[in-house]
Image (cartoon, rainbow, N blue to C red):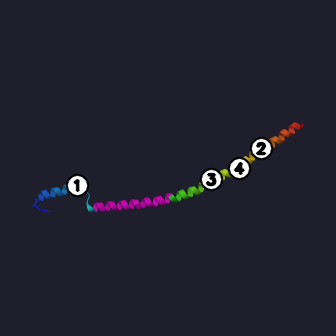
Amino acid sequence: MMRVLVPARLRKAVRSWFDSRYISVANHRQDIKDALWEVQTLRREVVTLQDEVRKLAGHSRDALRLSRENAEALDRVVQNEVLVWQAVDALRERR
């Protein structure tokens, strides 16, 4: 590497050009801290969403069970209604 004497004004201009194009170390550290905070916030939100999904899965199992029970009960009601109408028709034929 070779060292060259550079006028202060030119050195200052070059440094300001580099500073305007690139982020400073302090700003870079702050950006890293901000990104880490965002990741931690997102991690907490994901955990919360996972808990909600588990709860909803439990509710969906209950809903499925209740819908099956309801369908079975309704099927029995319809079968009983058929039996009632068959009995009514049998009584009409006797008369």
Mark 4 or mark 3: which is in front? 4
- Say what amino acid the circle numbered 2 marks: Glu
Circle nearer the N terminus (3, 1): 1
Residue 59 coordinates in the image, percent (x, y): 59, 55
Look at the image and tell me in which quarter the C terminus lies: top right
The secondary structure type at the circle numbered 2 is helix
Mark 3 or mark 1: which is in front? 3
- Asked which quadrant contains residue 61, the reply is bottom right
**Which mark, by number, is residue 20?**
1
The secondary structure type at the circle numbered 4 is helix
Tell me the magenta residue range.
Answer: 26-49
Mark 1 or mark 4: which is in front? 4
Per the model, the C-alpha gap separating discs 1 and 2 is 85 Å
**Which mark, by number, is residue 38?**
none
- Say what amino acid the circle numbered 3 marks: Ala
Circle nearer the N terminus (1, 4): 1
**Residue position for label 3:** 63
Mark 1 or mark 2: which is in front? 2
**Residue position for label 4:** 72
Look at the image and tell me in which quarter the N terminus lies: bottom left
The secondary structure type at the circle numbered 3 is helix
The prevailing secondary structure element of the residues shown in magenta is helix
The furthest residue to the right: 95
**Which mark, by number, is residue 81?**
2
